[in-house]
Image (tube, grey):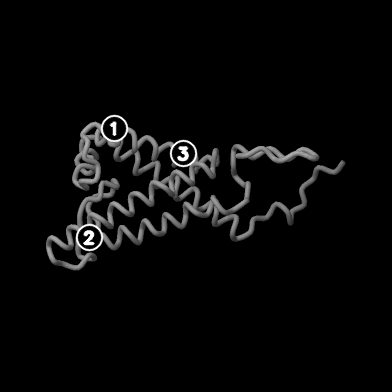
Amino acid sequence: MNTRVSPASSRWTLGQAALVAARLFLGAAFLYLGAVKALDPVDFLKQIHAYEILRAPGLVNLTAVTLPWIEMLCGLLLILGVALRGAALVTLLLLLVFTSAVAHRGAALAAAGRVPLCVIKFDCGCGSGEVFVCHKLAENSVLIGLALLPLGWPDQRLRLRRPRRARKGGPASPE
């Protein structure tokens, strides 16, 4: 039995390299921004409160304490390639919620000040300080695109855990 890998099969395609780069970038971003929030939970609590979406104080407190750790866990899993699709899915859902919240708050501030949306600047609670709403929405759109890549790409490179292969006559175990 020949176990040698041919040089042609060990080369990466542009798509495979892009997937790994997307995972590493998105993972590093979530790890860093989650850490910024975790290191100053009181400030993050104030930012959550400013959105006026969560009304119950207990829920606001719980969100301020747990959300940064969920972000950091997702970032670490993306970087390591462990539970990749699950981590990408949670990251995608978080980004969709964050983006909707920023758009909602930006629109409310624009309406209150009777100014265009793109001139509104506020601290979105993302861990990066004050940002222009349109810039943050564009940034989050790119991150959403990066989070979608691991969900639809079957590549297994640079992962610590790979799905087991299907046995003859049996289905492969889920990831």
Residue where numbered disc 2 is placed: 107
Q: Residue at x 60, y 55 (%)?
A: 16
Residue at the image point whose x is 23% and y is 58% from the top? 106
Circle 2 or circle 3, nearest the eye: 2
For the point 13% across and 66% down, the residue is: 114
Q: In the figure, 37 relative to 154: above or below?
A: above
Up-down relation of residue 40 to residue 7 (above or below): above
Task: Give the percent coordinates (x, y) of residue 93.
Answer: 42, 47
Which residue is at a point 20% across and 65% down the rendered structure image?
Answer: 119
How far is mark 2 from mark 3, CA to CA? 33 Å
Determine which residue is flagged by label 1. 62
Choose the circle earlier in sequence order: 1 or 2. Answer: 1
Instruction: Name the secondary structure under disc 2.
Output: helix
Judge depth for marks 1 and 3 and give the one in front: 1
Three-letter code, disc 3: Leu
Amino acid type of the residue tagged 2 in the rendering: Ala
